[in-house]
């Protein structure tokens, strides 16, 4: 067992005194605000106090709350509003997540980070260093002021900084379950609000903080950062249903998310998820007679039934969506738009025009990009809004600003985690095999959809990605299967019977017995 460092012992000793001082300061501040007739500050102080308690006693829940805040997904509170000059509450949440993760690492410095956490940390450090270099280069060449460049690339830098610290935070199983529960609750509330908004039942802006809305084929479309968490939730929910994890919860939750994703009418997400599910499931099925392979083979028909049920629910929620062929037209438009890419009416043509203008401006600077230059510093007349970044061209947001090198550094942690989770999936099945399976589906789908979507090139999407990658590398998720595989290798090398205390206990109630 590791011995706490002097820093950790000092922090633990001073924790009660520091907490008492904090309570005293809060009480004084509350009294002052009440005396002046102001209540807004009281709510903010109460929120800070709750977050402080979570930091001390429930790290998983605090991480989830800060992730939702970074994605503007906290019900009743719009975190996109400014907190300080040019700094939104979302940015404060990202700073807080980095800071509190660093504090946890210092307090538990005796714990050794697993190798995968160190690899993700190196990926994050390289990305952060490259973004800082690009911001300095943009400032040195007169392209943009330093603060403007840092703001332009803040999402990439948040991702890099979070990868350096968050995977090193060791979570217990209770904390991990709390983290997942809060994220599931947040995305379910968002999905309910999105369905109600799209179908015209209500306009719950307190649940859906949309950045924009539009109309496609007569149906309202909601553009919100929480759609990225919905995307990940569907991938992991489908995996949970396939592997039979707590069906009383996983089936209704996955159905809700599937309906919300369907009425959203985003073709890139549909195509990416279907392709990823097929590819990852095929890989699992080819893993011989391992229990995960058997479970996937047996339960693939369940997911087909789930899709049929989701379509039925969509028909009940909005009969015109199917009877009017809006859903079918949207699916077929993926092919007709490609065929009509030479016209200005197809969305594919618009994206091609924007990408073409970007590539023409990029020229030979594709390895390092044009720079982190906001439109307020330099307005590019050939680009929409005069900006180097555009929400319709996905990966070009990185290529134009930090170059192909920067884009590769963004993709690197996803590829590292995919390779790692594939290795874990080949070992003995644990109770979190569904999370490893769903994580692979989400990673592959995110890489595919990144061609046009900005999940990997936005503040909300990258904060969520850093959190999910950190969850997948937690020892409580993966280390059990590593240890089991090592024990199995030792047993195969020896003819001696395996001691009962070393046997892996298979949790059939969590995964379902494929036999």
Image (tube, rainbow, N blue to C red):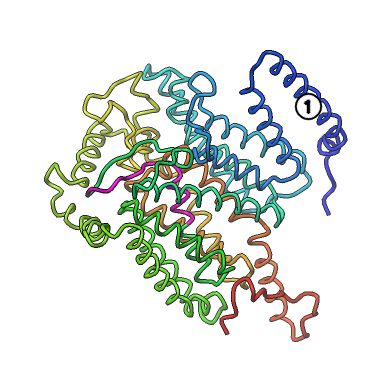
Q: Which one is nearer the viewer's eye here, 96 or 30?
A: 30
Q: Residue at x 18, y 53 (%)?
A: 338
Q: Is residue 59 above or below residue 320?
A: above
In the rendered structure, the answer to whether residue 391 lies left or right of residue 280 reads left
Percent across and percent down for residue 325 are: 22, 60
Q: Residues within 10 Å of mark 1 (few under 14, many from 20)?
A: some
Tell which of 286 and 97 is nearer to you: 97
Name the quadrant of the N terminus: bottom right
Which residue is under mark 1?
Answer: 22
Tell me if 47 is positioned left or right of 216 in this view.
Answer: right
The number of numbered badges drawn on the structure is 1
Q: At which x and y percent is residue 178?
A: 65, 52
Q: Is residue 163 magenta?
A: no
Q: Secondary structure at mark 1?
A: helix
> Foreground residue, 139 or 201?
201
118 relative to 390, above or below: below
Q: Residue at x 84, y 38 (%)?
A: 12
Q: Position of residue 366 (x, y in %)?
A: 32, 37
Q: Is residue 222 magenta?
A: yes
- Relative to 20, is 146 above or below? above
Could you say where residue 435 lies in the image, as x and y percent from the top left? 56, 62
Residues rendered magenta in the picture: 218-233
Image quarter in which the C terminus is found: bottom right
| Residue occupying image coordinates x 35% and y 19% | 376
Residue extending farthest to the top is 36
Tell me what residue is drawn at x 48 percent, y 49 percent. 229
């Amino acid at each position: 067992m590791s011995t706490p460092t002097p820093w950790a012992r000092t922090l633990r000793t001073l924790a009660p005194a520091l907490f008492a001082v904090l309570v005293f300061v809060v009480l004084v501040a509350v009294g002052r605000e009440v005396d002046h007739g102001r209540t807004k500050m009281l709510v903010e102080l109460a929120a800070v106090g709750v977050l402080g308690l979570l930091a001390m006693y429930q790290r998983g829940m605090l991480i989830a709350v800060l992730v939702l805040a970074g994605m503007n997904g906290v019900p009743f509170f719009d975190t996109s509003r400014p907190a300080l000059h040019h700094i939104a509450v979302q940015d404060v949440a990202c700073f807080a997540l980095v800071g509190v993760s660093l504090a946890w690492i210092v307090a538990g410095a005796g714990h050794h980070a697993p190798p995968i956490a160190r690899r993700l940390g190196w990926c994050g450090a390289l990305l952060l260093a490259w973004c800082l270099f690009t911001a300095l280069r943009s400032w040195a060449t007169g392209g943009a002021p330093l603060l403007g460049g840092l703001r332009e690339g803040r999402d990439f830098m948040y991702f890099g900084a979070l990868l350096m610290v968050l995977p090193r935070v060791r979570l217990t199983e209770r904390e991990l379950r709390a983290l997942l529960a809060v994220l599931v609750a947040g995305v379910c509330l968002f999905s309910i609000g999105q369905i109600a908004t799209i179908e015209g039942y209500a306009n719950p802006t307190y649940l859906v903080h949309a950045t924009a809305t539009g109309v496609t084929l007569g149906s309202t479309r909601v553009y919100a950062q929480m759609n990225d968490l919905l995307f990940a939730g569907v991938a992991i929910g489908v995996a949970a249903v396939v592997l039979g994890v707590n069906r009383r919860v996983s089936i209704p939750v996955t159905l809700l998310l599937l309906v919300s994703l369907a009425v959203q009418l985003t073709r890139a997400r549909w195509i990416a998820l279907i392709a990823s599910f097929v590819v990852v499931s095929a890989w699992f099925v080819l893993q011989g007679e391992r229990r995960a392979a058997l479970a996937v083979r047996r339960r693939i028909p369940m997911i087909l039934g789930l899709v049929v049920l989701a379509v039925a629910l969509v028909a009940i929620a909005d009969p015109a969506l199917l009877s009017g062929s809006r859903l079918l037209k949207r699916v077929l438009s993926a092919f007709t738009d490609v065929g009509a890419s030479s016209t200005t009416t197809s969305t594919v043509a618009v994206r091609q025009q924007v990408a073409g203008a970007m590539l023409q401006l990029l020229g030979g600077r594709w390895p390092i990009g044009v720079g982190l230059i906001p439109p307020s510093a330099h307005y590019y007349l050939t680009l929409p809004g005069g900006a180097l970044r555009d929400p319709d061209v996905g990966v070009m947001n990185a290529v134009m600003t930090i170059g192909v090198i920067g884009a590769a550094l963004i993709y690197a942690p996803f590829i590292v985690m995919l390779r790692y989770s594939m290795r874990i999936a080949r070992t003995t099945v644990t109770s979190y095999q569904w999370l490893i399976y769903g994580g692979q589906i989400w990673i592959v789908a995110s890489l595919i959809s990144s061609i046009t979507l900005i999940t990997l090139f936005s503040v909300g999407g990258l904060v969520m990605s850093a959190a999910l990658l950190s969850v997948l590398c937690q020892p409580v998720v993966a280390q059990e299967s590593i240890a089991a595989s090592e024990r199995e290798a030792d047993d195969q090398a020896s003819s001696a019977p395996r001691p009962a205390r070393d046997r892996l206990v298979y949790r059939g109630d969590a995964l379902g017995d494929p036999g």
